Image (tube, helix red, strand yellow):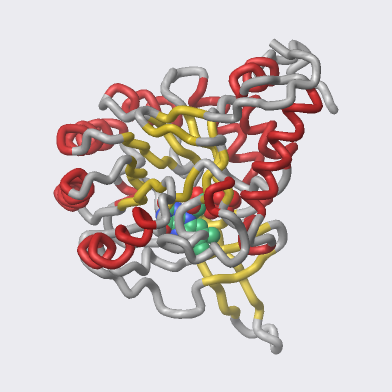
Amino acid sequence: MAVENPNTVDTSQKIGSLLLKNPIITASGTFGYTNEYEEFMELKSIGGIVTKGITLNPRQGNPQPRIKEVHGGLINSIGLENIGIQAFIEKKLPVLKENNINFIVNIAGESPEEYKKIASICQENEINAIEMNLSCPNVDKGCLEFGKDEESLYKLVLEVRKVFRGALIVKLGSNVSYPEKIAIAVQNAGADAISAINTVKAMHVNINKNYKGFKFIKGGLSGQSIKPLALNFIYEIKKHTNIPIIGMGGISNLNDMLEFFAVGSDAIQIGTGTFTHPNLSEKLAFKLENFMKVNGYNNLQALIHSLRTEDMNKNGND
Ligand SMILES: Cc1cc2nc3c(=O)[nH]c(=O)nc-3n(C[C@H](O)[C@H](O)[C@H](O)COP(=O)(O)O)c2cc1C
């Protein structure tokens, strides 16, 4: 319930066993492994960070060029370049712990066994939260394939749930025919939360100057152009699930964030927006707090509840 201009507001949010200071998290692949963005912002001003995607073995990623700015966003085909879980545990985990950073480790595998192995290593090393990437469009094997079919997805998440006791978040993409079936499978398998959406399969084309032939880059589209897809995806899965949803896809200002809360998100992630404004997540944390104070919401749940009161004139214009 709204109260008159509270001096302090409670922006905290819980995702399974993970307590966030506020619902703003930076998205995997856009914020490094640890404290790389420390020179741009105060890392403790946000709810947490998601690490770059980590696989069992180190990966070199796809050949260059693998990133292209397009109207309203980016197409990337990084292909999960990373140092692998062992090097992550040895070199990056101590930095995260020493700096008291609230973090979620994003993991990806080429097979169910690989996901299980990485999750076990995370458990052994007392990592509090993992995000299973089941939706990366930029790798040949694994990932996206598991995230498309609800039965194999259910089995995979169930297996990971057996070995990992911390907050288990499953990241989905919109490249699926029945989002609600996929989301129900994730919930039934025991995940604590769903995060969505990953990048969307896309292509950029450059016609040669002499109009003979063309060059292209294929990859995953992110940024403002995917926001409507992301909002619709979250709205659809929210109707069929009751675990928390972490929404993302093109969030670049306070209003975008509020739209994600309205359709069903309990927290949000900032991805591509960080590339234009490295401290965007910090700015949004301040803006959210200020918005709540000015509008009399003394806690985040009150704001989310108020936003979710659906307008009956569903198809009306603004
Ligand atoms: C350069 C780049 C690298 C990414 N790497 C990963 C990754 O390793 N794992 C993952 O789950 N998502 C990855 N993503 C997807 C983002 O985490 C996010 O889901 C997506 O970009 C949508 O959010 P945005 O529009 O705010 O960027 C990557 C995105 C970009 C742009």
| Location of residue 23 by image quarter | top right
Residue found at the very far bottom of the displayed protein: 210
Q: Between 177 and 117, which is closer to the camera in this rendering?
A: 117
Q: Is residue 159 visible?
A: yes
Residue at the (74%, 18%) spot, across then down: 314
**Residue 163 in the image: x percent, y percent?**
16, 38
Q: Left or right: where does residue 22 sit relative to residue 173? A: right
**Residue 117 in the image: x percent, y percent?**
15, 50
| Location of residue 116 by image quarter | top left
Q: Between 7 and 272, which is closer to the camera in this rendering?
A: 7
Q: Between 305 and 148, which is closer to the camera in this rendering?
A: 305
Q: Left or right: where does residue 185 sit relative to residue 206? A: left
For the N terminus, which image quadrant?
top right
On screen, 277 above or below 255? below
Q: Left or right: where does residue 195 sit relative to residue 71? A: left
Q: Is residue 199 visible?
A: no
Residue at the (74%, 21%) spot, across then down: 6
For the C terminus, which image quadrant?
top right
Q: Left or right: where does residue 52 sit relative to residue 271? A: left
Residue at the (16%, 33%) spot, across then down: 162
Residue at the (49%, 39%) spot, across then down: 196
**Residue 266 in the image: x percent, y percent?**
54, 28
**Residue 155 in the image: x percent, y percent?**
20, 33
